[in-house]
Amino acid sequence: MTGSRILALGHYQPSGVLTNDDLAKIVDTDDAWIRSRVGIRTRHVAAPDETVDAMAAAAAAKALAASGLAPQDIDLVLVATCTAADRSPNAAARVAARLGLSAPATMDLNVVCSGFTHALATADHAIRAGSTKHALVIGAEKFTDVVDWTDRTTCVLVGDGAGAAVVSASPDPEIGPVLWGSVPQMGGAVRIEGEPARFSQEGQTVYRWATTQLPAIARQVCERSGITPADLAGVVLHQANLRIIEPVAERLGAVNAVVAKDVVDSGNTSAASVPLALSKLVERREIAAGDPVLLFAFGGNLSYAGQVIRCP
């Protein structure tokens, strides 16, 4: 095998929904203010007993069922998250137990909002190295656990959920080379710190960096896969903020692509946002099997990672 491919996708969102009007009852804001600044109208909120690993397992179970593989076929589980409550057992081990997997390697990756694309690259590398044949790659977050509900600049952004992919060895590479990196000197622009841990950010700093620097980096991702932005059928950026997604997609030059805008209904779900949005696009058949899709995420640590995949 010379590469890997995504066999199937799945996603999960809690049944609880928080609207902009609901938020207006607990913080000084309103629907017009939120929509004009971030483009979000609703977000899903997990129940108090609904854990990161429970949501991750629900999304992974759907992806596994759609892949046609059996639980014992999975030999690697990667969970991208920054909001798991416990350090051990990690979320990946708990997902493996929930799904009845046999003896997989289990790892959590904390790269905040770009966690899923980092994890997807890690699975691809493991498969290319011959240590893995079938992997579950999951992004899952319960961001509402770490938000400050008195801060109207951040509490309007976040939501909960999970997205998952089954990634398998393939004779033809369908997951392109990753381009990843960070800006360590600006890492403090997005923080989840303190006791209890709380999310905060320098919003304008993140906005300026994302809208000015990311289009050129995203074009480099395409170049590594040997295509141009005009060749893309889909663009799935981290669903941070509609006011970031739209200008970055426009400056990228993906004139023929469907651009994911799941942030409008789901809010910013951090590491879950890319697989969640991609799974929905595929479920709605807005992108055809085999079409090239750019996955590109950015955020905490001012880390970024992206690759071009072929749609399952």
Image (cartoon, rainbow, N blue to C red):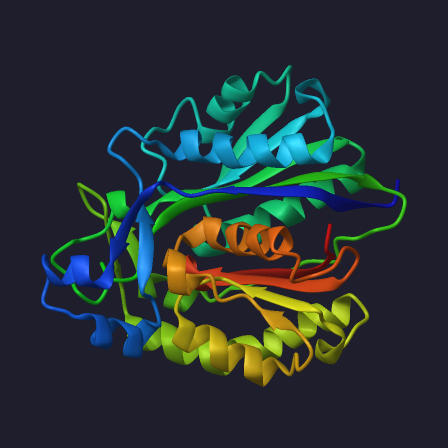
Query: Who's the residue at 69% across and 18% down the image?
Result: 72
Tell me, yes or no, if residue 207 can be seen here. yes
Q: Where is residue 143 in the image (x, y as percent from the top left)?
A: 32, 47
Residue at 22 percent across and 70 percent down: it is 31
Is residue 165 or residue 196 the one in the foreground?
A: 165
Q: Is residue 180 visible?
A: no
Total marks in image: 0
Figure quadrant of residue 150: bottom left
Residue 266, placed above or below residue 136: below
Residue 16 lies in what quarter of the image? top left
Q: Is residue 292 above or below residue 149?
A: below
Direction from residue 158 to residue 290 in the image, left or right? right
Q: Is residue 149 above or below residue 81?
A: below
**In-front residue for pair 19/95:** 19
Coordinates of residue 221 in the picture (x, y in percent): 68, 68
Position in image of residue 296 (x %, y %) = 58, 63
The residue lying toward the viewer, choosing from 294 and 121, is 294
Q: In this view, does 249 lie to the left or right of 242?
A: right
Q: Which residue ends up furthest to the front in the rendered image? A: 284
Residue 25 position in % (x across, y down): 10, 59
Image quarter (top left, top right, bottom left or bottom right) of the N terminus: top right
Residue at the spot 64% in from the left edge and 54% down from the top edge:
282
Could you tell whether 51 is left or right of 98 in the image?
left
